Amino acid sequence: MISYARQTQQEQPDAPTPVEEHIAPAPRVSVQAFCETVETAAAVQSAGEDRRLGKAHLKIQMGGMAAAIEAYRSAPTPNVIVLESDGRNDLLSGLDHLATVCDAGTRVVVIGRINDVMLYRELVRRGVSDYVLAPVGAIDVVRSICNLFSAPEAKAVGRIIAVVGAKGGVGASTISHNVAWAIARDLAMDAVVADLDLAFGTAGLDYNQDPPQGIADAVFSPDRVDTAFIDRLLSKCTDHLSLLAAPATLDRVYDFGTDAFDAVFDTLRSTMPCIVLDVPHQWSGWTKRALIGADDILIVAAPDLANLRNAKNLFDLLKAARPNDRPPLYCLNQVGIPKRPEIAAAEFAKAIESQPVVSIPFEPQIFGSAANNGQMIAEISANHKSIEMFLQIAQRLTGRSETKKQKSSLLSPLIEKLRGR
């Protein structure tokens, strides 16, 4: 089954690459790999640098099966053992020997060169968790280890989408909130918006919500963070959309460590199919960590030189830090301000080497009305052209192309108004 997927991908060059699939991050586990070739060791080393294995403690040794058996004669086994082996008979006998020194609960991933379904069944019978056909790349190792800790029959949940502005005041928060609205309403996905700008966040205003608690309660009480605690902090905006609001007060200083939001993000991943992070325009350890750790990223930029420089810097850094992920996406906002010289979208695309997802025109009347009324653009004008742009962004970020709109009826406008209230 594993080798068939590899062959199918090679025969169909136009098919989506594995980089585009959603792979949930692995928890804090220990992984030890015993490789026989330098190429496999390099792939495992590269996998260890992937964001999805950021919490795993990885150790690599050469020597294959023999080295593994010798290592665990007097030492406890880790959560995951990755073994590379060339032979069939030696592999099966080696696994039998390894079982005598292997602790209960340890999961074994075998990297082999024999494409044989009978061998695969025999490995499964012996308790091997996964068999990966060599040669392997970093993403193959990442996928194999991460999939050990997620149910294969379950839907992919916990996709984190980070939205950040290339410069302050470019409307990144407005776009993130409207995109999250499109994800919840048009794609019918349960989503939550996490406002990470604790001092000046606007998500509560945009959604017309004023919850007594929010994300600050979780960040400042990391020991209390669990599913039940986060559920109490969520403010319900619609049937499919919830908000983890920022306090937007200045009664305390919001200086955070690099991993301050880790517990919040991990808990949201386990309960919500889609998490949209409204990341403030600042550069610190925790904002960098939030962006690199996200599954997909949207950079919002205005069409001027400072935004072009900042967007390219962000794009290059994130692309280098996440080599096994899709590159970040970006969109242009506030395009067409009267009498303002602008850099064309083609120049942005040439510098960043990527086309913008959409270019959103400058329309202060409708965007200003929505902001002052605490509404989304779709609530102000159901047929506004920017709504389709928000949906395009939502589809690109979530990997979904089909919308799931409810059938309309004569009572639909009245129902929508009641839901808004």
Image (cartoon, grey):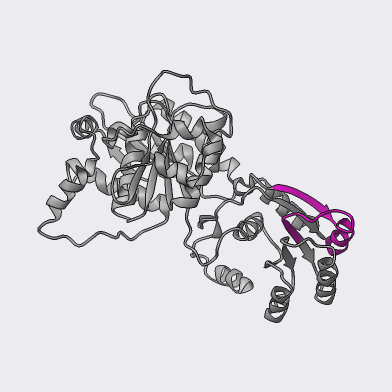
Left/right of residue 174 with respect to residue 232 in the rendered view: left
Residue at 37%, 52% (x, y): give it: 190
* Camera sees residue 32: yes
Q: Is residue 192 above or below residue 7?
A: above
Tag count: 0
Q: Is residue 297 visible?
A: no
Is residue 64 located in the magenta-colored stretch of the structure? yes
Out of 4 and 103, give the one closest to the viewer: 103
Q: Position of residue 303 (x, y in %)?
A: 36, 31
**Residue at point 82%, 60% (across, down):** 36
Q: Residue at image x 54%, y 40%?
A: 263
Residue 15, relative to residue 157: is it above or below? below
Residue drawn at (39%, 58%) of the image: 400
Work out whether 365 lies above or below 243. above
Q: Residue furthest left?
A: 410
Give the magenta range.
Answer: 57-82
Q: Residue 279 sits in which quadrant?
A: top left
The N terminus lies in quadrant: bottom right
- Where, by quadrant of the figure, is residue 163 drawn? top left
Residue 147 included in the magenta stretch of the image: no
Residue 188 x/y as whole percent? 32, 56
Q: Nearer the viewer, residue 413 or 322?
A: 413
